[in-house]
Amino acid sequence: MLQQTQVATVLEYYKRFLNRFPDVASLAAADEQSVLALWAGLGYYRRARQMHQAAKQVVADHAGRFPETLDEIKALPGIGRYTAGAIASFAYDCPAPILEANTIRLFSRLIGLREDPTTSKSQALLWEAAESFLPPRSGAGTINQALMELGSLICKPAQPNCNQCPLNSGCKAYADGLQAAIPIAKQKAKPQQRDHAALIVRQHQLYLVRQNDGLGWWQGLWDFPRIDVTELSITTSKRQATISQAVEQAFEETLGLSCRIDSHAMTIKHSVTRYRITLECYFATLSSDAFALAAAGKRNKHKVGRASRPADKTRRELENWYWMALGDDQLPLTASAKKLVHWLNGNQEQ
């Protein structure tokens, strides 16, 4: 959970996760939807899937006991060299190095690295530097923790406290006065704007949601019917009728949903990696054919009327639709879907 996520954000998720899955066996036995539901909101959902897969592998290949050697740990899904080194050194005191943001900065300054630290050549030099600090037998975990703390508290990104650093006598960046220039900052990708549209379809106090498929963002998570409409150039300066027609056509072409836009509900702005997304949410009414599609999925506990499966839809496509009550906490929703549910809970009179 702490990979690319701050401690303060993780704490509550961590407690809930361990309450539900207190050991590797319970995690391995769970279905993916249950795992994703507890992870929803943390982002980077691939981490949850890989941890779930790793738990299954630990049960299947190691009789439910977490492996203790570096190579066996690295063989688990989602565990790379850094995570494996952290587990091996902290849990088992194995002489395994680790490289993360703080130690990359620390070692880059110590060896005077004047190249991009993310290149293969630089990474080899940094791993070599990390290994050079490790004791041959015991104490690797303590050393690794100390190096991380040194990078975090002393060798800071800006204005490092070099006079307080116990390693300053051997630091090339300090000797050459290059602390501010090392490590070389990686060029950040320019944010890209994307426009999305979502439908709010209500029937008998239930709302239509769709499970994202295995391609693209939010794999396996549930969301209100949603599509990318960036190419439509939806702006507030356009007439509402023009916007509605464009969105209606886009939903029919993309998801096969024939609908009528009734009104604009709300706007949600959020980010995914380098993308800045503006999500426009619309109250909508589906045609009878679209209702048949939505009601035919076998996950649907709340079927609306008698609906046969449309002949041109596969079983998997039908299983992706579901009628959800706003209080349903069993589905792993996207963060934006959760925001929309929260908004709807306060506006149910509409």
Image (cartoon, helix red, strand yellow):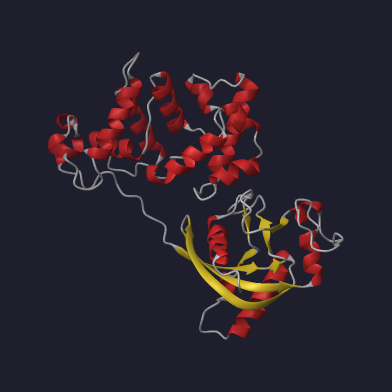
Query: How many numbered badges does the structure rendering display?
Result: 0
- Eyeballing the image, is 230 above or below 330? below
**Which residue occupies 32% across, 21% down?**
134
Q: Residue furthest top?
A: 137
**Which residue occupies 48% across, 43% down?**
13
Where is residue 72 drawn, in percent x and y? 53, 22
Q: Residue furthest front?
A: 349
Residue 243 found in image quarter:
bottom right
Q: Out of 187 and 66, give the one closest to the viewer.
A: 66
- Eyeballing the image, is 140 above or below 159? above
The reply, left or right, for residue 153 in relation to residue 138 is: left
Q: Out of 190 and 114, give the one closest to the viewer.
A: 190
Where is residue 296 drawn, in percent x and y? 81, 58
**Which residue occupies 36% across, 37% down?**
122
Where is residue 137 drawn, in percent x and y? 35, 13
**Which residue occupies 64% across, 44% down?**
33
| Residue 285 in sight here | yes
Residue 63 found in image quarter:
top right
| Residue 4 in sight here | no
Where is residue 206 drawn, in percent x and y? 69, 62
Q: Quadrant of the C terminus?
A: bottom right
